[in-house]
Image: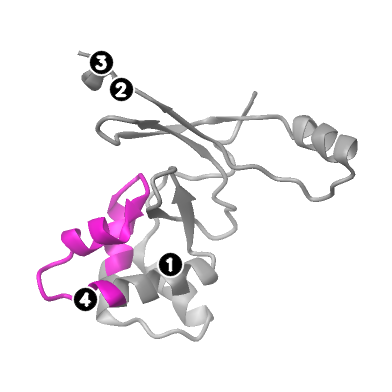
Amino acid sequence: MKNCAHKHSHQRQEMSALTGRLRQQSRKITGPRAAILEILRQHPHPLTNKEIFAALPQGGCDLATIYRAMQLLEKLGMVKRFDFGDGVARFELVGEGDDGHHHHLVCTSCAEVVEIGECFPAEIENRIARANGFKAVTHRLEFFGLCPGCQT
């Protein structure tokens, strides 16, 4: 397995860089967008829209505004959407020039998330693509199990 660390950066992005990316796309820096970016900036793991809403100061914005903001940020490539199989979208900031590709280990009991730093070699994707006549093959892979705390 290869290490995906070069593709996904854990370094906290500066708020000025994030707002600059919005400005480059001719998007306004609204109060709710800035607050959402700050929350995402502080969390190393993907968050749901409801988790973002709960982390905002009360009355900061409504849930519909968060949904719209997350759709915009995903469209602009500033966040990546993850699906852990429970029907709830989760979002994580993506650095500029980062494709956001990495995997997670998710506890099926408490939903703790651990980021996995390893990935499959590109050769596996290439072999699968060739064998089936596909091109531009990629993958999404999440692991599930019981964390140490839930095993007791």
The tag on residue 151 is 3
Determine whether label 1 and label 3 are within 8 Å by CB: no
Determine whether label 3 and label 2 are within 8 Å by CB: yes
Of labels 4 and 1, the one closer to you: 4
Q: Is residue 132 left or right of residue 151?
A: right
Which x, y percent locates residue 81? 47, 56
Instruction: Identify residue type, mark 1.
Output: Ala
Q: Which residues are magenta?
A: 36-64
Label 2 Cα crowd, 10 Å radius (few <14 / some 14-19 / many 20+): some
How far apart, in angstroms, are the residues tagged by discs 4 and 1? 25 Å
Q: Earlier in the sequence, mark 2 or mark 1?
A: 1
Instruction: Give the residue at mark 4.
Output: 62
- Nearer to the camera, 134 or 25: 134
Label 1 Cα crowd, 10 Å radius (few <14 / some 14-19 / many 20+): few
Instruction: Give the residue at mark 2.
Output: 147
- Nearer to the camera, 54 or 144: 144
Q: Is residue 120 left or right of residue 13?
A: right
The tag on residue 17 is 1
How far apart, in angstroms, are the residues tagged by discs 3 and 2? 6 Å
Q: Is residue 92 left or right of residue 150?
A: right
How far apart, in angstroms, are the residues tagged by discs 1 and 3? 41 Å
Query: Residue at image x 35%, y 71%?
Result: 67
In the rendered view, tell whether residue 128 sits above or below residue 29.
above
Of labels 1 and 3, the one closer to you: 3
Label 4 Cα crowd, 10 Å radius (few <14 / some 14-19 / many 20+): few
Q: Secondary structure at mark 2?
A: loop
Can residue 14 be found in the magenta stretch?
Answer: no
Q: Secondary structure at mark 4?
A: loop
Which x, y percent locates residue 130? 89, 38
Instruction: Identify residue type, mark 3.
Output: Gln
